[in-house]
Image: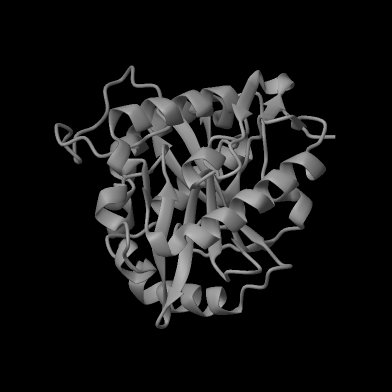
């Protein structure tokens, strides 16, 4: 039975270091998660695509076999592992509990198949000793633009993150080279944001050093990320599901909230600047008092 309640994750407790890989083994049936906000994510994808297609969906021709393999794998997964939610009726994929349905054309590209799930999806193919981003459906990014990263290797994609290249790039490349089809993994990324927007992009009008207004509502943003290798093409599918809760919900969990404050305080100055921790920290202190 698919659990459709919205989960509240606390990844900062086990992995307070923002740059921790924090990989966890995952059984295939738990590859993707769903909740009753699925239609909201679907509508967000359509809206973002209409507003800025080039920053939402891109694909190289070399990714077509991997896109097709992903589509077949995903459809089979939804109809078998989540058969209580997803059903196929003729040329329709339906999810009555989520109030959603999609027409199946038989030749779904990554964009079309990504509409079936709340996650953003990236497809990576090996190139030399790295992996290159060759296809992506991205409607809920955190501080990055697809047009700037598309077609680049992971080392270049992660370059703006302070310390990433030195601490994580070698580990990630080594891990991906050994990722097995039968052993998908998950990890979590966490942030505090001053809005509940799924698409969280930099605002040039904001002063990074300026404190937030007293009435600013803060939100706990968690990204549940999965990595899974495709059997035939050898591509790696990277999914990102954004889960947003009001920070007041996290504040009710006293131990978790104090752990968050400690994780922020123990971050390097470079990470504090990159994640906007300095701007939100005073408001977090007030909320937790």
Left or right of residue 211: residue 180: right
Q: Position of residue 231 (x, y in %)?
A: 66, 68
Q: Residue at x 50, y 47 (%)?
A: 110
Residue extending furthest bottom?
128
Left or right of residue 90: residue 71: left
Of 128 and 184, the residue lying toward us: 128
Q: Position of residue 243 (x, y in %)?
A: 55, 35
Left or right of residue 226: residue 55: left
Left or right of residue 270: residue 172: right
Q: Residue at x 62, y 35 (%)?
A: 104
Of 57 and 257, the residue lying toward us: 57
Q: Position of residue 21 (x, y in %)?
A: 53, 65
Q: Residue at x 45, y 57 (%)?
A: 18
The relative height of residue 34 versus residue 31 in the rendered view (above or below) is: above
Which corner quadrant of the image does residue 26 belong to? bottom right
Which corner quadrant of the image does residue 168 belong to? bottom left
Determine if residue 220 is in view: yes
Of 11 and 42, the residue lying toward us: 42
The relative height of residue 108 versus residue 249 in the rendered view (above or below) is: below
Q: Position of residue 268 (x, y in %)?
A: 34, 60
Q: Residue at x 19, y 34 (%)?
A: 210
Determine if residue 195 is in view: no
The quarter of the image holding the N terminus is: top right
């Amino acid at each position: 039975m698919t659990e459709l309640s919205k989960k509240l994750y606390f990844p900062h407790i086990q992995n307070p270091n923002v740059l921790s890989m924090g990989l966890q083994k995952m059984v295939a049936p738990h590859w993707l998660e769903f909740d009753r906000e699925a239609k909201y994510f679907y509508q967000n994808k359509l809206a973002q695509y209409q507003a800025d297609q080039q920053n939402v969906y891109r694909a190289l021709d070399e990714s077509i076999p991997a896109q097709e393999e992903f589509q077949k794998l995903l459809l089979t997964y939804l109809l078998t592992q989540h058969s209580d939610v997803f059903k196929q009726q003729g040329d329709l994929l339906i999810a009555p509990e989520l109030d959603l349905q999609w027409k199946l054309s038989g030749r779904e590209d990554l964009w079309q198949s990504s509409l079936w799930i709340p996650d953003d999806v990236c497809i990576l193919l090996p190139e030399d000793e790295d992996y290159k981003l060759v296809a992506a459906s991205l409607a809920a990014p955190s501080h990055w633009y697809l047009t700037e990263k598309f077609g680049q290797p992971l080392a270049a994609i992660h370059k703006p993150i302070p310390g990433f290249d030195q601490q994580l790039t070698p580990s990630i490349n080594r891990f991906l080279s050994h990722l097995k089809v039968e052993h998908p993994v998950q990890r979590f990324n966490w942030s505090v944001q001053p809005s509940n927007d799924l698409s969280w992009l930099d605002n040039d009008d904001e002063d990074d050093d300026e404190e937030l207004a007293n009435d600013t509502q803060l939100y706990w943003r968690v990204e549940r990320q999965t990595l899974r290798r495709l059997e035939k093409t050898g591509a790696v599918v990277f999914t990102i599901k954004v889960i947003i809760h009001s920070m007041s919900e996290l504040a009710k969990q006293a131990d978790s909230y104090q752990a968050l404050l400690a994780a922020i305080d123990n971050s390097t100055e470079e990470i504090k600047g990159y994640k906007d921790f300095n701007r939100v920290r005073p408001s977090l202190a007030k909320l937790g008092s």
